[in-house]
Image: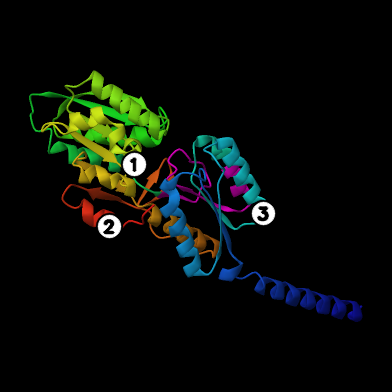
Amino acid sequence: MKKIVVFALVLCLTLSMVACAQAGDTGPKKPEDIRIAIVNQNQGNPVFLDLEVGAKDKAAALGIQLEWTAPPNPDSVAQAEMIESVANSGVDAIGVVPLDSTLNDVMMKATEKGIHMAAINGIDIFYDGLAFIAGTPQFEGGYESGKLALQFLTDKDKIYKIAMIEGQAGTETFTLRMDGFRQCLDDNGVKYEVLGPYPCNDDFGLSGELVEQATNDNPDMDMWFFAGGWPFFLDPEAMPIFQEWVKQEDKHCITFDTFPPMEIYFTLELCSGAVGQDYYRMGELTVELLYKLVLGEQLPAKDDDFKGVDWYSTGVEIVTPDNYKEIFAKKRPW
């Protein structure tokens, strides 16, 4: 009987030592073993160039593996398939630049596998388990655009006509920008009516056509608000009606986005102000925060939340005719 008891004690001690040894092997991963993936919206959109550079720069600084992938064209089905494929490849974390909320399900399934998931500028994405959203505060960005407009909307008795252009009709990103713009005008007692918004479906050529048509049909309007910079990716000569209209003393254009090709519109005095997004910081911050999660570290205090998901703001930049040369000089050329 004593022999049985001694054997049992030895067996328990042995198993305990093995368990301790195994527990010691499950410590934090080494940086070089960490794999983080970014699934972008599409391959051809230059808007995301700085995002990619920021993510890769941060990954290199941390010494981790970064995989950057995207479908050839904006396609939520294709993007969902890529997210699923990357999730099944054994990555530790994934950042997604989502096209729309249809990606909620596939991102949630990846979370259930134990993969840390984040959305980059993805305000349509929210579900229990999403780690965070990193990006531009869209409503606040629209509000800042409204502040730029206020200096030209000073007649408290006049009802101003303001035309607006958006991307995909009803997309929350653009709706929030326009809502922020309107709220700023409302808060400051500006009377106005909105023409549009005209949806360009993120098509540069179509955006120019819409601007030309609306300007031609409403020559007495006072202001354009572009909820995204689509028309300013075109050669200015592609919008002669707009050019003639905006060069009048009391006509103005305020735009969201501040990408390198848009500088010419400031040089030609065709734009009165712009609010931009820091895509480089978005990529950098997303990788940095996902890395902390993989290591089991606590994230810093959030800036805000969006429908219950922690939000980390990358802020906005304000461009005016007075500072545009300095700001565009710091941007990476396309």
Residue type indicated by callout 2 = Ala
**Residue 205 horizontal/vertical position (percent):** 39, 32
Quadrant of image for the N terminus: bottom right
Write the start and end of the magenta stretch as one range: 106-134
CA gap between label 1 and label 3 equals 33 Å
**SS under mark 3:** loop
**Residue with the mark numbered 2:** 329
Q: Which of marks 1 and 3 is nearer the N terminus?
A: 3
Residue 298 visible, this angle: no
Q: Which amino acid does label 3 sit on?
A: Ser
Which of the labelled discs sits on residue 138, or is there none? 1
- What's the residue at 33%, 46% (across, down)? 261
Q: Disc 1 to disc 2, how far (Cα)?
A: 25 Å
Are the residues tagged 3 and 2 within 8 Å (C-beta)? no
Nearer the observer, 42 or 13: 42
Residue 266 visible at all: yes
Determine whether, in the image, residue 17 is placed left or right of residue 74.
right
Residue at label 3?
Answer: 89
Residue at the (19%, 53%) spot, across then down = 323
Q: Earlier in the sequence, mark 3 or mark 2?
A: 3
The single residue placed furthest to the front in the displayed view is 237
Q: Which residue is drawn at 39% across and 34% down?
A: 204
Mark 3 vs mark 2, CA separation in Å:
40 Å
* Residue 240: % across, % down: 25, 30
Identified at 71% across, 76% down, the residue is: 21
Q: Is residue 120 magenta?
A: yes
Sort mark 3 into few (<14), some (14-19) or many (20+) by Cα contacts within 10 Å. Answer: few
Residue 69, x across and y down, in percent: 56, 50
Q: Quadrant of residue 262?
A: top left
19 on left or right of 248: right
